Image (cartoon, helix red, strand yellow):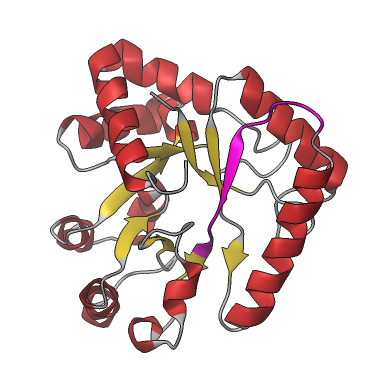
Amino acid sequence: MKVIDFHSHILPNIDDGSKDINMSVEMLKRSKQQGIDVIVATPHFYADSNTIEHFLNKRARALEQLENHTDFSAPKIVDGAEVCFFTGIGQADEIEKLCIGSSNLMLLEMPFRAWSTGDLREIERLLNRGIRLIIAHLERFYRFQQDKEWILNLLDLPVLIQLNAECLLHWKERRRAIKLFQNGQAHLLGSDCHNLTGRPQNLLEGRAVLEKKIGRQFLEQMDQLGASLLREDI
């Protein structure tokens, strides 16, 4: 079964992730060393500073550059985006072009503020368009929601939840993260790696915690889900 990193900023010079091709190549090597088979490249997309067409062209150039500089058996890279939530996203033209690979999956970053009914309605509009949403690093939004009902309301929607491996490495966040996985409320793991130091590739460490706390069978089920979601691209 393939090990998939569902969230990364490994492409060079496209967002606040890898600053150049040399860093990207090293990040890719570290991913390989950790036994990762597939990396979903998810550079940030901000609608207020970019058009979809410009973003896709820039992403294609960055991916081509990385592939041309990779002289080893690297993990497969699947193109995607970390789409920053914006008002009107549910009705935005051509938003489907930001889905991962050839799938209908979209990695969506929720707002770093208190959520509202309008925000969840935007989510529902995307779902009604046939887009299957993966909510990026849910653990990072708890502190912005004084009323935790907003988290529960989001979890009630037919969305997939991705957590960052980092939250499994800190005791203050680990218990809640494990509970989300155990309860079937979290589904996928990503490194959200940005560089080689402050935000490095750490998927292997997070997976080790899940295996220790929940078991090897759980990891295998998570990998099976990931493979089924990306079956056309991996």
Q: Which one is in front, 59 or 20?
A: 59
Q: Which one is in front, 32 or 13?
A: 32
Instruction: Locate residue 203, reporting x and y percent.
Output: 51, 28
Q: Is residue 50 visible?
A: no
Note whether 176 is above or below 54 in the view shown: above
Q: Quadrant of the N terminus?
A: top left
Instruction: Locate residue 180, reporting x and y percent.
Output: 23, 37
Rendering quarter of residue 32: top right
Note whether 212 is above or below 142 in the view shown: above
Instruction: Locate residue 139, reporting x and y percent.
Output: 37, 46
Rendering quarter of residue 193: top right
Specify start and end residues of the magenta stretch as a single range.
71-82
**Magenta stretch holds residue 75:** yes
Note whether 51 is above or below 112 in the view shown: below
Q: Which one is in front, 125 or 209?
A: 125
**Magenta stretch holds residue 112:** no
Residue at (29, 31) in percent of width and height: 224
Residue at (58, 74) in percent of width and height: 46
Q: Is residue 184 left or right of residue 15?
A: left
